[in-house]
């Protein structure tokens, strides 16, 4: 199976931001995405070009255009938040974003009426119905198809950094799970989700897709739901491992880290140097550690098994990637990673809010809503 790669301008960036709809009075999820999307239609009845639905009717997804800078992509989707809010505010509905809703129950949620979603639920049953998860997806443009797989493999070494920084799902269905990112554990229960297989080259990706299609496991490439995947249609690598984040500050910082890592690896390839990668068993262990411990995780750094606190390695990366960030115009956003380390990742902030309010999970929802409305990390 030959898969054409569209190719994009190098290191251009796009962001997808999944937003949950909640009742302002109770904090519970509300299934009115179809109503919101209808209200956002153009005068000719056409759907909004960038705001779409998702698996469940409690969610809208905001999709940026293609941008050369992180700031442009963040401003794009944050502007779309205002468009959605113009519809939801009069209805008493607030917006939040986190990897999970603190107390929502799967059996109260409605599935979007699309064939692909009904097929997913029919196949996956209880696990599929439990996909009350929200994330951010970041696309970075790749100008040469032969770079895609080496960069994808190299990025696996930085998934724990991204997962720990974005971790925002400590609660599930009213229970404190003990995980910083319970979403990471839930999402990988779906077939074709989770960590990618280690591939040698683009031909190996084509063979994988052919095998999966021939046996009826998938109908098309979009059903490969890996934490990082090639996106041939857009000419990008798509990073999907992150929990949802509730502030533009976090969104920009994490997107900048991703854009810089991809550009740095692309530069290494141009110079004829191999992009470092790790054994898949180390990659898998790192994912679990970051999911469980978040910013307190001690992660494996390289194929030799060297270890370091993820927070220390994030600080190291800020220094290493700063020249790349300056060239890409995202240095301001990259150094905002320090703000996440100082204020705490969302899972830490949520736990603090719950503790300060006698365990109240509606109070956590209210805090998430306030963060999204304010756009910046709490001081």
Image (cartoon, grey):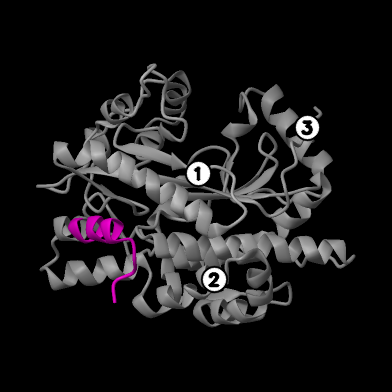
- Label 2 sits on a secondary structure element that is helix
How crowded pointer 2 is (Cα within 10 Å; few <14, some 14-19, many 20+) is rated as many
Q: Which residue occupies the foreground of this view, 306 or 206?
A: 206
Q: Position of residue 107 (x, y in %)?
A: 24, 34
Q: Which of disc 3 and disc 1 is earlier in sequence?
A: 3
Q: On the rendered structure, is 115 left or right of 87? A: right
Cα gap from disc 1 to disc 3, whole angstroms: 23 Å
How crowded pointer 3 is (Cα within 10 Å; few <14, some 14-19, many 20+) is rated as few
Residue 161 highlighted magenta (yes or no) = no
Magenta part of the protein: which range?
Answer: 366-379
| CB under 8 Å between discs 1 and 3 | no
* Image vertical order of residue 12 relative to residue 340, above or below: above
Residue 373 highlighted magenta (yes or no) = yes
Query: Which image quarter holds the N terminus?
Result: top right
Going 33% across and 38% down the picture, which residue do you hit? 59
* Image vertical order of residue 188 relative to residue 255, above or below: above
Cα gap from disc 2 to disc 3, whole angstroms: 33 Å
According to the image, label 1 marks what residue? 64
């Amino acid at each position: 199976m030959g898969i054409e790669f569209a190719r994009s301008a190098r290191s251009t960036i796009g962001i997808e931001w999944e937003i949950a709809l909640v009742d302002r009075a109770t904090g519970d999820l509300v299934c009115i995405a179809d109503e919101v999307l209808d209200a956002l239609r153009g005068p000719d009845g056409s759907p909004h070009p960038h705001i779409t639905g998702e698996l469940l009717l409690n969610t809208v997804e905001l999709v940026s255009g293609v941008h050369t800078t992180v700031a442009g992509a963040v401003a794009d989707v944050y502007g779309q938040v205002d468009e959605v809010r113009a519809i939801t505010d009069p209805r008493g509905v607030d917006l939040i974003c986190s990897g999970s809703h603190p107390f929502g129950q799967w059996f109260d949620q409605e599935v979007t009426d699309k064939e692909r979603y009904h097929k997913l639920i029919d196949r996956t049953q209880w696990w599929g119905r439990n996909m009350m998860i929200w994330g951010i997806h970041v696309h970075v443009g790749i100008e040469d198809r032969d770079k895609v797989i080496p960069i994808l493999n190299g990025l696996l070494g930085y998934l724990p950094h991204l997962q720990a920084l974005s971790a925002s799902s400590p609660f599930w269905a009213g229970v404190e799970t003990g995980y910083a990112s319970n979403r990471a554990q839930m999402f990988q229960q779906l077939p074709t989700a989770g960590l990618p297989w280690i591939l040698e080259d683009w031909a190996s990706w084509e063979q994988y897709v052919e095998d999966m299609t021939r046996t009826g496991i998938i109908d098309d490439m979009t059903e490969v739901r890996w934490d990082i995947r090639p996106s041939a249609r857009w000419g990008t690598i798509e990073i999907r491992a992150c929990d949802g984040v509730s502030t533009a500050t976090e969104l920009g910082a994490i997107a900048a880290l991703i854009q810089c890592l991809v550009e740095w690896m692309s530069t290494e390839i141009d110079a004829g140097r191999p992009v470092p990668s790790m054994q898949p068993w180390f990659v898998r262990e790192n994912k679990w550690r970051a999911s469980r411990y978040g910013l307190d995780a001690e992660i494996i750094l390289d194929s030799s098994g060297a270890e370091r606190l993820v927070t220390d390695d994030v600080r190291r990366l800020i220094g290493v990637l700063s020249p790349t960030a300056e060239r890409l115009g995202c240095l301001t956003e990259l150094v905002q990673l320090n703000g996440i380390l100082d204020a705490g990742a969302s899972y830490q902030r949520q736990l603090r809010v719950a503790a300060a309010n006698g365990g109240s999970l509606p109070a956590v929802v209210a805090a998430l809503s306030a963060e999204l409305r304010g756009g910046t990390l709490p001081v």
